[in-house]
């Protein structure tokens, strides 16, 4: 018998993006400080594909769009595009896409000697204790995030 679990009011939307054409954009040699302005660098060190940068294992990687506010303390915001890698070994402390009783959620995974919990990143939500009564599956580890600052 499955126990009903109330998850924070959020969902994830799966996003199919197709294969990246490996468009490579300039990667400047100088790092850009977020504090005071520094002299402009005119040297391009290399070219980078964001897909290659974010996707560790292309055949095991997919994207989900986050909805809700339960992960704001981990700097994951509504509308963020999460890069989820199914090939990574799951470790305690990872942010994961999990399925609990047929509902998807994104949470930080905590594995201890006493059990497994899914931790929200917002104090208004409670952790989800994973018990034997629950159907639980980790779909993948969140490897990265893409966020639009301006539309």
Image (cartoon, rainbow, N blue to C red):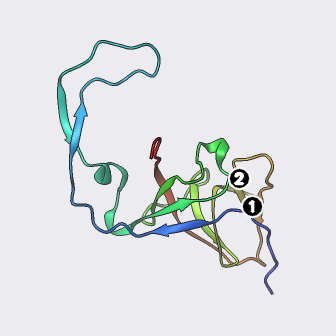
Q: Give the image quarter of residue 38.
A: top left
The answer to whether 11 appears left or right of 81 in the picture is: right
N-terminal label among 1 and 2: 1
> Answer yes or no: do the residues labelled 1 and 2 have beta carbons within 8 Å?
yes
The answer to whether 1 appears left or right of 135 in the picture is: right
Residue appearing at x 80%, y 55% in the figure: 126
The answer to whether 135 appears left or right of 37 in the picture is: right
Which residue is label 2 attached to? 120
Q: Percent position (x, y) of residue 63?
A: 45, 63
Which of 38 and 116 lies nearest the eye of the viewer?
Answer: 38
Which of 74 and 78 lies nearest the eye of the viewer?
Answer: 78
Residue appearing at x 24%, y 27% in the figure: 29
Could you tell me which secondary element the residue under label 1 belongs to?
loop
Q: CA distance from mark 1 to mark 2?
A: 8 Å
Q: Give the image quarter of residue 92.
A: bottom right
Up the image or down, 27 lies above or below 122; here it is above
Q: Percent position (x, y) of residue 125?
A: 79, 53
Q: Residues within 10 Å of mark 1 (few under 14, many from 20)?
A: some
Q: Percent position (x, y) of residue 128?
A: 76, 62
**Mark closer to the observer (1, 2):** 1
Which residue is label 1 attached to? 8
Up the image or down, 31 lies above or below 136; here it is above
């Amino acid at each position: 018998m499955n126990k009903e679990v109330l998850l924070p009011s959020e969902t994830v939307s799966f996003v199919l993006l197709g294969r990246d054409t490996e468009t490579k954009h300039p990667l400047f040699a100088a790092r850009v400080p977020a504090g005071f302005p520094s002299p402009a660098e005119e040297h391009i060190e290399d070219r980078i594909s964001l897909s290659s940068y974010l996707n560790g294992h292309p055949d095991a990687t997919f994207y989900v769009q986050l909805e809700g506010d339960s992960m704001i303390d981990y700097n994951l915001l509504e509308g963020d595009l999460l890069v989820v890698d199914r090939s990574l070994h799951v470790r305690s402390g990872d942010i994961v896409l999990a399925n609990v009783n047929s509902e998807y959620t994104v949470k930080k995974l905590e594995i201890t000697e006493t059990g497994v919990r899914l931790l929200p990143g917002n104090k208004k939500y409670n952790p989800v204790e994973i018990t034997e009564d629950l159907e639980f599956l980790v779909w993948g580890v969140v490897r990265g995030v893409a966020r639009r600052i301006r539309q």
